[in-house]
Amino acid sequence: MLRDAWLVAGKDLRIEIRSRVATNQIVPLAVLILMLFAFALGPGRQVLAPASSGLFWLAVLITALLAIQRSFAVETGEGAQDALRLMGLDSAGVFLGKMLAIAAQLVLIEVIIGAGVVFLYGAALHGMVMVLLSCFFGTIGLAAAGTIYGALAAGLRVRETLLPLLFLPIVAPVLLSGTKAWDAALAGTVSQGWPWIRLLGVFSIIYLVAGVVSFGPLMEAA
């Protein structure tokens, strides 16, 4: 399973590195979203800084949708999903590989958005451990849930509009927990953020286990 996961993750990441879609399209979009939020709320940092946690996770969510759609659109158009099934790869390994590739892109996006939140919005991150843990579990949750529903919507003609409808309600607990944890880190009340970190970890593990168990039938259905 782990060998197949590394093979699939390496394949997806090589495609993205060669196409440069993440660096030429998704990353500039993330920066543009931050700038639009700044214009919408006003130039004053006293307004932007308190809202930076929610704006961070909203920007991550929008760019995550693009990364997930891109991950499955490449394979759907060329019939690569059928090739993966014919290769006899472990379905759990395929899920973990695609999830790792999406998570790697999300890490790059989160670093850039996080830097933008600090420099553009003037946010002060007092609890870096809590910020890093929330990003770690949030990345796992978004990538795992996105891989599940990306595979479910991949074989449909309306996948571009269906994926957000399926994905957004499921990841709402991840976004809420991540935002609350960031709020605690920004306010310097780290002790209030640990329950949200635990909740975020629980949902991330649930999505991860659900993907490992159900990805095989989802590939056959797609």
Image (cartoon, grey):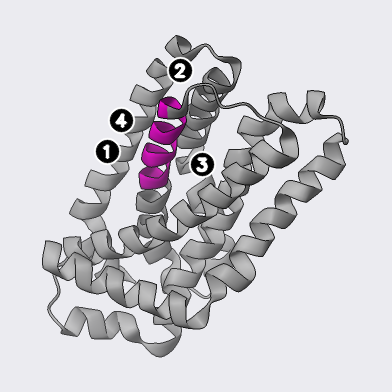
- Tag 1's secondary structure? helix
| Front residue of 79 and 177 | 177
- Residue depicted at 39% across the width and 58% down the height: 104
Who is closer to the viewer here, 78 or 61?
A: 61
Q: Which mark is in front, 3 or 2?
A: 2
Quadrant of the image occupied by residue 198: top left
The magenta segment is 129-141
Give the spatial CA distance, label 4 vs label 3: 17 Å
Q: Main secondary structure of the magenta part?
A: helix
Residue at which label 3 appears? 169
- Are the two marked residues, 1 and 4, in contact with CB atoms closer than 8 angstroms? yes
Q: Name the residue located 50 percent from the left edge and 63 percent from the top edge.
A: 67
* Label annotation for residue 202: 4
Which is in the foreground here, disc 4 or disc 3? 4
Whole-number angstrom distance, CA of label 4 to CA of label 2: 15 Å
Across and down, in percent, residue 32 comes to 74, 56
Residue under pointer 2: 193
Q: Earlier in the sequence, mark 3 or mark 1?
A: 3
Q: Secondary structure at mark 4?
A: helix
Local packing at callout 4 (Cα closer than 10 Å; few below 14, some 14-19, many 20+) is: some
